[in-house]
């Protein structure tokens, strides 16, 4: 077999594998497009098996995936550029490495997991591997983004007026969370994350993940078994990002 024939055979095998499998989406992926109470579409057929491992349509991840493996294989390029540029700005502004790391992680949920309440999801995801102060900043950046702080020159974002309209007001639960964060000893850590959270990031400025290898090495406790396989309280969340269409 020459290399073209080998590539064709591999393609053929991949298509056959896909045809053999039943791959369904979790309710949360389609809730809204369809009523979650409706019965799911039936896609089973004779000889078909429900997917219980990696999705053949996605880039295969290493057996012991690291944070950057997830960034390379499961997070959108736009959000990654945004997080990298925010981290670079934070570093340029001379803030602590904890805040640089928080910038590097803060929107991992919007880019790779779940958008709604993204600060809470992201904080929960990384909590077992970072300082509590970093997780706090990530959790509350989402909340603090809605509330100005003149003392550090942080204003309500113009982009939010465009995105949500001039009449949008944060829900009461956000007001409560804001008051809690404002009185917390780590308020300024979370606030500095919002200050370095770049609104109008430049898609043409390229920042490489490698630029932050040192910060991640010092402040992100990468599990030896790989993210998802270490039995931490959020390991299942990493596995779901790795294998998002597993039937159970
Ligand atoms: Fe965010
Ligand atoms: Fe952001």
Image: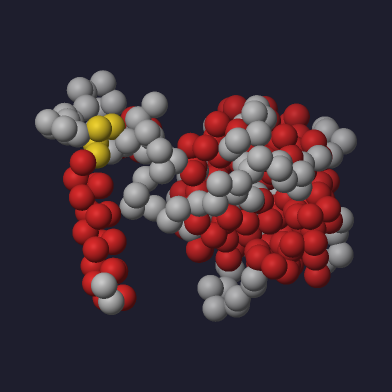
Q: Which residue is drawn at 31% across and 75% down?
A: 3
Q: Which colour scheme is used?
A: secondary structure
- Looking at the rendering, in which quadrant would you find the N terminus? bottom left
The answer to whether 41 appears left or right of 103 in the picture is left
Determine the image quadrant of residue 138.
top right
The answer to whether 55 appears left or right of 12 in the picture is right
Q: Nearer the viewer, residue 189 or 98?
A: 98
- Looking at the rendering, in which quadrant would you find the C terminus? top left
Q: Which of 215 and 99 is in front in this view?
A: 215
Q: Position of residue 173 (x, y in %)?
A: 60, 27
Determine the image quadrant of residue 200.
bottom right
Q: Residue at x 24, y 39 (%)?
A: 21
Q: Residue at x 58, y 28 (%)?
A: 172
Q: Position of residue 242 (x, y in %)?
A: 49, 44
Q: Position of residue 141 (x, y in %)?
A: 68, 45
Q: Where is residue 174 in the image (x, y as percent from the top left)?
A: 61, 32
Q: Residue at x 55, y 35 (%)?
A: 237
Examine the rendering and report whether any part of residue 159 can be seen: no
Up-down relation of residue 64 to residue 49 (above or below): below
Q: Which of 79 and 214 is in front in this view?
A: 214
Examine the rendering and report whether any part of residue 27 can be seen: yes
Q: Which of 223 and 14 is in front in this view?
A: 14
Q: How many labels does the image show?
A: 0
Determine the image quadrant of residue 177.
top right
Point out the residue furthest to the left here.
46
């Amino acid at each position: 077999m020459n290399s073209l024939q080998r590539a064709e055979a591999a393609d053929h095998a991949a298509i056959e594998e896909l045809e053999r499998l039943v791959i369904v989406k979790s309710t949360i992926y389609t809730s809204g497009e369809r009523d979650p109470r409706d019965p799911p579409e039936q896609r089973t057929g004779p000889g078909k098996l429900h997917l219980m491992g990696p999705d053949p349509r996605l880039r295969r991840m290493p057996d012991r995936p690291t944070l950057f493996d997830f960034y390379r294989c499961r997070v959108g390029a736009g959000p990654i550029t945004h997080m990298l540029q925010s981290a670079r700005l934070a570093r340029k502004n001379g803030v602590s490495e904890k805040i640089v790391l928080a910038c590097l992680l803060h929107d991992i949920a919007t880019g790779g997991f779940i958008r709604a309440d993204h600060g809470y999801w992201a904080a929960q995801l990384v909590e077992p591997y970072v300082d509590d102060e970093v997780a706090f900043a990530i959790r509350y950046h989402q909340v603090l983004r809605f509330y100005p702080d003149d003392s550090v020159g942080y204003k309500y974002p113009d982009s939010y007026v465009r995105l949500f309209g001039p009449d949008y007001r944060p829900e009461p639960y956000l007001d409560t969370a804001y008051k809690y964060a404002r009185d917390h000893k780590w308020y300024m850590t979370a606030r500095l994350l919002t200050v370095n959270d770049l609104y109008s990031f430049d898609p043409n400025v390229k920042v490489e993940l490698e630029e932050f290898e040192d910060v991640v090495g010092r402040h992100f406790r990468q599990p030896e078994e790989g993210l998802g396989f270490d039995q931490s309280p959020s390991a299942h969340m990493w596995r779901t990002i790795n294998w998002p269409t597993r039937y159970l």
